[in-house]
Amino acid sequence: MKQAFVLLLAALAGSAALAQEVPATESVVTPVVAPAAAHDAAPDATPAPATPPAPAAVPATTPAAAPVVAPAVTPAVTPALAPPYVPLAGRWDGDFNAAFTFTSGNNNSQSLNLGVDAVYQSPDDKLSLYAQYLETRSRNVSNGVVTTSLTALQWRAGTRYDSNLTPEVFGFVGLDFSQDQLQLLALRSVASTGLGYHLVKTTADQWDVYGGVTYRMDAYDEPGVMISDALQTRMITAETLMGEESSHKLSDTTRFKQKFVLYPSLGSGKGTRATLDAGLMVDINKTFSLSVKLQGRYDSLAEAPVEKYDLLFLTGVSVKFGG
């Protein structure tokens, strides 16, 4: 029993000696001895630095997605609405002309010419109206004898309607009536139809070509005219129609128009006819114009003393309207 007690004291003494030999930097942890007891056992020892606490665990996070940059939005600009298409309104344009000629002396003559030419035109169609009256008389005195003769008496009137099928192509129908006393023509009635093409169509210039067919009826005064080797007072035939016409604004005060049409008959021995109309208008003011017109007529059925060719040169004053 004593031996065991002595051994216990020796062990305690050895442990104390070992504790004094441990370096100051080392920390001796004795789970059995409380911290206060350890302090009492080694008062000169330098306390070990406290171990820094382990950093708190950072929870794993999903990498932040790159910010989505919205594309710049240009404010919508509402285009200005085009004004609705409004076709140009149709309008009347034309002139009325008159000329009177009087001569006195050895030969007395009187000549009267009246005419009207009117056009109603819109972007899609055109209506033409025309009329003319011409009368010329001469009075001769020879050896006290007065002789009066009729050198010209004719009139004509007609209309034509054109309608555009496309911007370039148009169709037309027309009616024409005429009389020529010197050719014994009591009345000529012609209905026509066909197609045409606008070669040029501007504000200042217009040029058309066209073709078609006609239905013609002639009534002649007695004793009639020679047709197919026989005198006849009536004739009915069909004709082909080939023509061209144009109008030009040469300047602010000058206008020119011309028209040529050829009518070959489809009936044997019933002749061919042609018409030519040309006119130059020079404005005096907004109302009046000077007019110079040339008219030509050809009729293969005319017989002597009547000429097949009839040419008229007319001058006068015109009154404008419309436009």
Image (cartoon, helix red, strand yellow):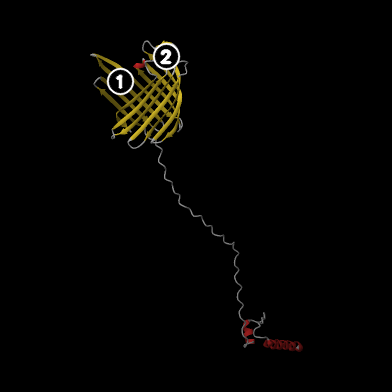
**Which image quadrant for residue 59?**
bottom right
Quadrant (top left, top right, bottom left, bottom right) of the C terminus: top left
Q: Are marks 1 and 2 in contact (CB under 8 Å)?
A: no
Front position in the image: 1 or 144: 144
Q: Position of residue 303 (x, y in %)?
A: 39, 15
Q: Which residue is mark 1?
A: 135
Q: Position of residue 136 (x, y in %)?
A: 30, 20
Q: Position of residue 161 (x, y in %)?
A: 40, 26
Q: Which residue is mark 2?
A: 235
Q: Specify which label sits upstream in the sequence, 1 or 2.
A: 1
Amino acid type, mark 1: Glu
Front position in the image: 240 or 54: 240
Query: Which mark is drawn over residue 218?
Result: none
Q: Is residue 47 above or below residue 294?
A: below
Amino acid type, mark 2: Met
Viewer-side label of 1, 2: 1
Residue that appears at 33% across and 23% down? 132
Within 10 angstroms of label 2, few (less than 14), some, or many (20 or more) residues?
some
Instruction: Tell me how far mark 1 sits from mark 2, CA to CA.
Output: 26 Å
Label 1: element kind: strand
Front position in the image: 16 or 246: 246
Within 10 angstroms of label 1, few (less than 14), some, or many (20 or more) residues?
some
Quadrant (top left, top right, bottom left, bottom right) of the N terminus: bottom right
Residue that appears at 34% across and 26% down? 313
Residue that appears at 30% across and 20% down? 135
Front position in the image: 84 or 97: 97
